[in-house]
Structure formats: C-alpha cells, structure tokens
Image (tube, rainbow, N blue to C red):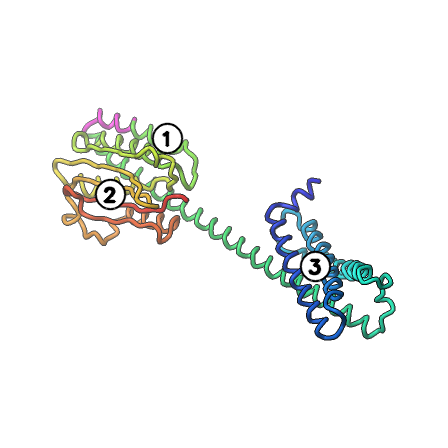
Amino acid sequence: MDALTRSFTPGNLKDLLRHGVTTAVFSCVIAVVLAISGRGGWVSQLIYSFSIGMISWLVIDIGRLLLAGRSDKPWPLGLPGILLVLTGVVIGFLGGNAIGDAWTGKPMLEFRTFSPDRLVSTLMITLVATIAICYYYYSRGKAKYLQGQIALAERDATDARLKLIETQLEPHMLFNTLANLRVLITTDPPRAVAMLDSLNSYLRVTLSGSRALAHPLAAEFQRLRDYLELMSVRMGARLAYRLDLPEDLREVPVPPLLLQPLVENAIRHGLEPKVGGGEIAVSARREGRNLLIDVCDTGVGIDNTRPPSEDGGFGLAQVRERLATVYGPQSSLDLSAGPAGGTRATITLPLPA
C-alpha cells in the first residue's frame, strides 16, 4: 500500500490521465487509417484499435509508475523498460483482439486464423504504434525531468550566491564598527563600553537567527533598529532616526540585511561629512503590486558626494546584486535627491502574489 501511495501522487496521476487521452486520440487516428486502407469498417477498426491502445497504455503507464516509485525519472531504463514495453504490447494485442472479437461476434482471438502476412502486419502495426507513443511519452517526461533538474540547479546556485553575499555584508559592517570602537576606546571609554554592549546585543540577535534566504520585513526593521542604536552610541546627538512600517506589510518576505547597507551608506556618505549630522528615515509603502522602501537622510546630499548613477561603493553594489539575483528585472534601487535635502534611496520589489 505504501508503494502504491508513493507511486500514484497527484502529479503522476495527472500525467497518467494525459497519456490516456493522447493514447485514445492516437488509437482513433489508427482506426481511421485502417478503415480508409480497406482493412474493415470504421466501427470495428475503432473497437480493435481503441481496445489494444488503452490496454497497452494501462499496462505500460501503471507499470512505469510502479517501477519508478517517487523518482522523478521519466522511464525505467535498460532491460526493465524494454520488458515493460513488450509486456504492454503482448497484453494489449491479446486483450484488445479478444474485446474486438467479442464486440463484432467473431470467434475469440480470430487473429490465429490470419494468413502469415496479415498476422505479421497486424503485429507490426501494434508494435510500431506502441513504441512510437511510448517514445513520445518518454521524450515529454525526459524534457520535464531535465527542466526540473535545471530549475533545481539554478535555485541551488542562487541560494549559494545569496549566502556568499550575506557573509560578505556582515563582516563589512563588523569591521567598520570595530574600527570606530577602537577610536572610542582611547577617546571616550564610557561610550566605547556602551557601544560594545550594543554590538554584543546586535550580534546575539543576528547570529542566533536562522540563515534563511528571506525573513519578514518586520524582522528586517528590527535588525535595522538594533544597528541604528549601535550607531547612535558612536554619533550621539548627531544621529536621529525614524522607522515607519505599516502593519499590513510586516509579514512581507525580504532578503536579510537588505536595508542595512543603505543605512550604512547614508551615515557614511551623508551624515558623517555634515558637521551637525542629521536624521535617517526608513519607510515602507505599497504601490500597486510593488513594495517600495525609502531610506532618506538629511545629509550633505548627492551633489556633494557622487552622481546618482554611480553604484556608491560596496554596500549599494551588493544591494543591487541581491535584488537582481532574487527578483530579476522586477526590482530596482534608485538614488535621488531628498525632498528636504540629503539623499533618498528607493528599493522597488514585487509583492508576493
């Protein structure tokens, strides 16, 4: 019973029925050809062809599923596959002729009285037709199997690429933080201790989380809050921040560490060069079928740092690469001047269907 359950999955049953319909159509075509060639009436030829074809289909297709089990391979290869086709041909030929003879009122298995030439031609028609349609099934199944393997390989490659990018991003942030911590240890020990405590909290949350390729947007905002708290220790009153995440967007899946490089870039290129510092505002909104995330700062602005067309160093380049890898051309990262000065980075990505 377990073997039958493993073999007859919904997908396999769907293929089985599709093959049955194809076999029925193919049997009708053979009946038409035989009737036109003078081998008998249309109805009798249809009964014989349909019976032989459907019995052969049931034996071969069900046997294929039982031999394959839950494997994705389209056909049992080697001797088992050859024996399965021959068995289907023999059983289909004998059973189909018996049904046809019973329907037309002829003696059971009348083909035994056929002349050698007619018997050979009947067997050849059955064999060639069965092999042709089995090859058609095999080709379709093989193409489907190869497509599945290609999709699996592409998914594994994408997963590995995203993991590599994420491992590059975390050390990048850590090295920058440790460099700042080194300066504070000599210039402001109390703030260095506070920064070290914040770093410890941030790393605990980050490293204890799963290494999934996506997590809810709410988790991304929470990680961003921890990071900004860490930066606030270093910059003090020069850094203010606001996070705005609508309730209906909290569970939208996004790649981890997607927003932190943008915030880090805003601090380094926007707020730090400005004597009085400024504010960073991160907000998410829905626009049609897209999710838009804005990272705005009130820093020195694009005109005083670099043109909007430039990638802007490691962080922005990695964000663009991650977006392209996960979402393809449906996503984008755009830099523009902020409405009140500074810079605005806007991520656009498709919402789940």
Q: Amino acid at mark 3?
A: Gly
Coordinates of residue 293 in the picture (x, y in percent)? 29, 42
Coordinates of residue 53 in the picture (x, y in percent)? 71, 61
The quarter holding residue 116 reads bottom right
The residue beneath circle 1 is 205
The residue beneath circle 2 is 265
* Nearer to us in this view, 198 or 106: 106
Magenta highlight on residue 190: yes
* Nearer to us in this view, 162 or 134: 134
Q: Are the two marked residues, 3 and 1, in contact with CB atoms closer than 8 angstroms?
A: no
Q: Which mark is residue 78?
A: 3
The quarter holding residue 114 reads bottom right
Which residue is painted at 35% across and 44% down in the image?
Answer: 168
Left or right? Give the position of 91 relative to 328: right
Which residue is painted at 35% across and 48% down in the image?
Answer: 323
Q: Nearer the viewer, mark 3 or mark 1?
A: 3
Q: Residue furthest left?
A: 275
Question: Which segment is the magenta one?
Answer: 188-197
Coordinates of residue 313 in the picture (x, y in percent)? 26, 49
The quarter holding residue 18 reads bottom right
Which residue is painted at 50% across and 53% down in the image?
Answer: 151
Real-space Cα separation, disc 2 to disc 3, in angstroms = 60 Å
